[in-house]
Image: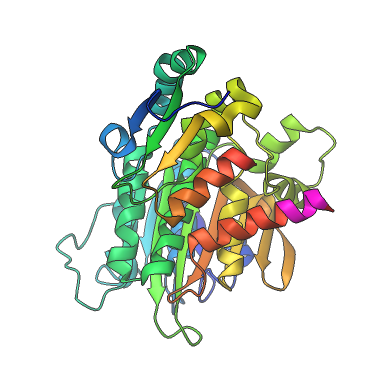
């Protein structure tokens, strides 16, 4: 039996620690027990990491999973972590309260489900016009990436929450995880000179770069434009793939080493009341391109 | 090769693909089966975005990529966008100017 003890406040401020805790060496006959005891707060990022990883263990090793010290009336339960992790739902009769500003975790299987989810997020989180557009646009693009590039056994695991009191304006967090082909592997297949995981993630975020061989389906603008939407609205954008976690914000880029992760995770934070709209961001991307071309 | 607006094929994007279009396969089919033959016979194309509420570059690219390659420098003279809100206009600019 292998025990997973989640770090406190998993995972927005400790994605690397959460990934580390989730991955004891597991062999095919192991049972995995996830101990929820010491946690004070698990955010959507933590939930999608846990869920995607447990689905990965089940599909790869047939691993049996148990939760210990889990409160079936908790927020984590209301987000749907038990059924999505393949466990019995102890408390299925939950209701949304008027103050709830989260969208339950979902396992989305195709573009029509991506569209429905992305449209629902701004409404449920009660985001204003510009912030609503940024959230819907970014989610659509990140989910489409999973469907088209990852071939993910767990499909796309996604969750969103709004934190009204975080910083002055509040923040919306979205997390999209898959357990398919990592971005870094796909970049390397396209460009063998890219050996470093951080470099591979950065290449994937270069406007116009695509791992697709079908030029009519993919322009290589989904990931970079979504990153710009987060950064230019004074949010953050994280991509984790293989052994690297890359963060982009207004101060630039930071990279962290993580334990090898099967698949790719994208995490965005956006303001509740944005000063820039999705159209503003795209205009700036175009203006920068014109400047670069002119220079 | 400038084209008069009456000599065009009009695509009602909402009627074909919905308020939040997403079906890239259908967009590529439309280009290959209907729009490409039209432009090859000298017609232009008007994309009418009336009622479209959200457009991503992923879908927009699949809507014009074949035409863009076929028409090259003539694309701007033969393909038009109408009734687009600001987001739709900028997304269409992104996929046609990048």
Residue found at x 64% / y 26%: B72
Q: Which corner quadrant of the image does residue A40 belong to?
A: bottom left
- Nearest to the observer: residue A273 or residue A84: A273
Residue B8 x/y as whole percent: 40, 25
Residue A54 x/y as whole percent: 45, 49
* Dominant secondary structure, magenta: helix
In reply to whether residue B67 is colored magenta, the answer given is no
The relative height of residue A31 versus residue B16 in the rendered view (above or below) is: below
In reply to whether residue A291 is colored magenta, the answer given is yes
Q: Is residue A146 visible?
A: no
- Nearest to the observer: residue A134 or residue A43: A134
Q: How is the image coloured?
A: rainbow
Residue B76 x/y as whole percent: 57, 34
Residue found at x 28% / y 66%: A124
Residue range in magenta is A290-294
Residue B46 x/y as whole percent: 41, 32
Q: Residue furthest left?
A: A93
Residue found at x 63% / y 41%: B97
Residue found at x 54% / y 71%: A7
């Amino acid at each position: 039996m292998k025990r997973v003890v989640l770090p406190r406040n998993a995972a927005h401020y400790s994605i690397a620690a959460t990934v580390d805790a989730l991955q004891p060496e597991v062999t095919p006959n192991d049972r995995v027990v996830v101990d929820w005891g010491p946690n004070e707060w698990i955010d959507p990022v933590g939930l999608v990491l846990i869920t995607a990883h447990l689905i990965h263990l089940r599909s790869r090793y047939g691993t049996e999973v148990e939760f210990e010290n889990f409160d079936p009336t908790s927020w984590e339960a209301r987000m749907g972590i038990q059924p999505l992790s393949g466990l019995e739902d102890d408390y299925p009769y939950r209701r949304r309260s008027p103050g709830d500003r989260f969208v339950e975790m979902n396992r989305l299987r195709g573009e029509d489900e991506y569209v429905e989810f992305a449209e629902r997020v701004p409404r449920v989180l009660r985001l204003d016009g510009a912030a609503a557009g940024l959230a819907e646009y970014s989610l659509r693009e990140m989910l489409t990436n999973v469907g088209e590039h990852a071939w993910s056994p767990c499909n796309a695991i996604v969750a969103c929450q709004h934190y009204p009191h975080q910083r002055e304006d509040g923040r919306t967090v979205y997390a999209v995880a898959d357990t398919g082909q990592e971005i870094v592997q796909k970049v390397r297949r396209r460009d063998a000179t890219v050996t470093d995981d951080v470099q591979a993630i950065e290449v994937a975020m270069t406007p116009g770069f695509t791992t697709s061989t079908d030029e009519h389906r993919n322009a290589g603008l989904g990931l970079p434009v979504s990153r710009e939407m987060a950064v230019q609205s004074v949010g953050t954008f994280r991509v984790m793939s293989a052994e690297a976690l890359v963060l982009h914000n207004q101060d630039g880029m930071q990279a962290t080493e993580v334990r090898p992760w099967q698949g790719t995770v994208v995490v965005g934070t956006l303001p509740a009341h944005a000063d820039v709209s999705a159209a503003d961001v795209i205009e700036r991307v175009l203006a920068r391109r014109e400047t670069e071309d002119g220079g | 090769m400038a084209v008069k607006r009456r000599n065009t094929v009009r695509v009602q994007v909402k009627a074909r693909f919905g308020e939040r279009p997403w079906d890239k396969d259908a967009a590529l089919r439309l280009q290959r089966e209907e729009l490409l033959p039209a432009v090859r016979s000298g017609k232009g194309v008007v994309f009418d975005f009336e009622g479209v509420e959200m457009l991503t570059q992923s879908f927009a690219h699949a809507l014009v990529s074949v035409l863009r390659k076929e028409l090259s420098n003539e694309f701007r003279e033969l393909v038009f966008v109408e009734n687009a809100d600001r987001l739709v206009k900028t997304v269409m600019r992104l996929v046609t100017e990048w």
